[in-house]
Amino acid sequence: MKNKILMATVFAFSVTTLPLVAGESLPATGKAPLASYLRPHAVPAPEDNKPTAVRVELGKALFFDPRLSGSNTISCATCHNPAFGWSDGLPTGVGHGMKPLTRATPTILNTAYNAILMWDGRKKSLEDQALGPIEADVEMNQDIPGLLKKLDALEGYRDLFKKAYPGEGISPATVAKAIASFERTIVSTDSPFDRWARGDQKAVTADVKRGFAVFEGKGNCTACHQGFNFTDYGFHNIGVKDVGDKPDEGRYTQRKLPSLKGAFKTPTLRDVALTAPYMRNGLYKTLEEVVDHYDRGGDLKENLSANIKPLNLDPQEKADLVAFMKSLTGRPVSVTIPLLPMH
């Protein structure tokens, strides 16, 4: 799937394939009907990996199992922790040998709707992405043949794979498909903003309503944060300072377009209050700092996106914008940690 994206239409959700152009983003939607910000009920899945209860059960076990790492101490959930909004609460992830990584851990919330993944867009689907962190020597540091041997040695996993993927066995493909099946269940839940969008005028306070007006208007936030998932699934250089000696070129590492140097994928704003620190390198601890960054038009000006300009927001507008973003926090969901196969 080359250069494809998902977008929410104004009146209904549809999966749309469009070529990403120089800036790699969708056109800004501007002001849109409130209903267009509601998450569609249907969760997309590929034909060869439609979700079933046993596939999700298997994927959940794999997601929380630290034996998927070479050290047997790091699971997918180590970095994508439900207690931290399916991120990790750290400026950047921590990988094999407790070594800090160079980028922040993104939430997996609503990744089922993404047709391109990772900060630099190097993965095209959840199935494509699932094995990447497992194999990466700086992350989970587990070679795939060794992983398959571990899983095949456990009767509990052999039985689950037989039920979830009859006739397919324990393979790289079925491991990836199972993890992806679980990740597709991690979707945003009902938030105060959603209840307001459905017509409950008392669901949010006046500052949230004012903040949403800033979001769609003076704040120019919809230039990148659009639709129910509040992302254009595109890549932008927003002028974030690098942390460390070596600049991170972002999307440019995948597509050698000068405009993409320092450009990174637009993250969802769903549950954003739960996923601090912010930015691809965890530079900011609070949403207030994030708003200040955009208000001053970013910091690094080289290859800066044309959408990033000083906003001249007053203190009330800034506070209202933060209140709006906090209203996107969904209803808490209890997550039961699975019992893992021991033999």
Image (cartoon, rainbow, N blue to C red):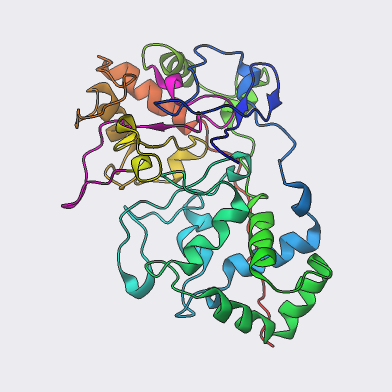
Which residue is located at x 67 percent, y 30 percent? 15
Q: Could you tell me residue 242's position as x and y percent?
A: 22, 44
Count of numbered badges drawn on the protein: 0
Q: Could you tell me residue 118's position as x and y percent?
A: 46, 47
Residue 45, image quadrant: top right
Q: Could you tell me residue 315's position as x and y percent?
A: 27, 19
Is residue 241 magenta-colored?
yes
Residue 114, image quadrant: top right
> Looking at the figure, which quarter contains the C terminus?
bottom right
In this rendering, position of residue 104 left or right of residue 184: left
Does the magenta stretch mainly form a helix, a strand or a loop?
loop
The answer to whether residue 331 is visible is yes
Q: Could you tell me residue 177's position as x and y percent?
A: 68, 59
Residue 33, image quadrant: top right
Which residue is located at x 49 percent, y 36 percent? 268
In this rendering, position of residue 44 left or right of residue 313: right
In this rendering, position of residue 308 left or right of residue 49: left
Which residue is located at x 62 percent, y 69 percent? 62
Which residue is located at x 63 percent, y 58 percent? 335
> Looking at the figure, which quarter contains the N terminus?
top right
With respect to residue 335, does 107 lie above or below?
A: above
With respect to residue 46, does 22 lie above or below?
A: above
Is residue 148 magenta-colored?
no
Q: Which residues are magenta?
A: 220-249
The answer to whether residue 50 is visible is no
